[in-house]
Image (spheres, rainbow, N blue to C red):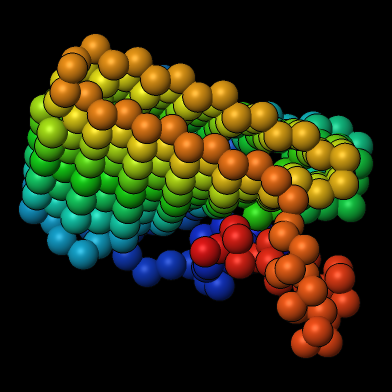
Amino acid sequence: MNKIDKKLLEQIADLHSTPTGVFNIRKNGEAVARHSDAEIEIVPKKGKSGIDIIVKNGVKNKSVHIPVIVTKGGFTDLVYNTFYIGDDADVVIIAGCGIDNPTCHDSEHNGIHTFYVGKNAHVKYVEKHFGSGIGKGGKILNPVTNLHLGENSFVEIDTLQIGGVDSSLRTTNATLDDKAKLVIKENILTTDNQQAKTKFKVNLKGKDCSVEVVSHSVAKDSSRQEFLSNLVGENECFGHVECDGILLGDAQMISIPKITAKCVEASLVHEAAIGKIAGDELVKLMTLGLSQEEAEKVIIQGFLMG
């Protein structure tokens, strides 16, 4: 691993060296390191690019690292990863993609992740995106996450776009069985002329299932963000979507909710708030000796990480 590789892995997966345990590290379309164990197996797909991650029934307190890095200009990567999470399993999955593009040609990663989550299983899925590079070529990321939550399962997804990504389309589709619970936390920062779009569709199919989506986003300069959510309540269920955004400069932000209730016992809620940084917060921090720019940075960091 060279210095750029290490920087990208640190940004997207908090890795400073090859991880212990189960992992698959992908660089420029190829697996460069992989390790399985008796409880979690990583198997290359046949006929297309990607891996199957098989977590056996009852596995507890295990983690899997599957970061992707791209360090070439003019390169498009497409990968299909499928997760089979056994009944009663408890696992943390650290994913994400970092692109360092030193050229004037666009680099792009498209990751399609599909989860089959067993009964009573718990999954935490962390996905970070980051772009860097001295070239003017675009850093483009289009992740797709498809989720099938089994009875009484729990899935928590933390997504973070931490800077340098010129264009992203983040798509999540989920179906929930009885008593399943899905929690999604999204934090996005765009600057300059960057574009970011998020699309959620959750089918609340099972009785007493629930979903909570919380999106915090900051759009600066001339960047543009769009947030689209679609909750479909097909049973006695609960769904809540909260979209909060801060605008700076000439940025634009759009939030479009859609709620469909197909059962009288479905309870679905959408909240959205978009605005500027409160003046009293800036003044308070500036009285402590910070410049306006420094105060804005502190507020933005707290908003995105809170």
Nearer to me, 206 or 155: 206
On screen, residue 45 versus residue 85, left or right, reads right
Q: Quadrant of residue 264?
A: top left
Nearer to me, 36 or 10: 10
Whole-percent x and y of residue 42? Answer: 31, 45
Nearer to me, 6 or 161: 161
On screen, residue 101 versus residue 77, left or right, reads right
Whole-percent x and y of residue 126? Answer: 43, 52
On screen, residue 286 versus residue 260, left or right, reads right
Q: Is residue 125 above or below residue 14?
A: above
x 77%, y 34%: residue: 252
Whole-percent x and y of residue 163? Answer: 72, 53
Q: Is residue 68 visible?
A: no
Whole-percent x and y of residue 254? Answer: 67, 29
x 32%, y 19%: residue: 232
On screen, residue 21 versus residue 181, left or right, reads right
x 30%, y 37%: residue: 211
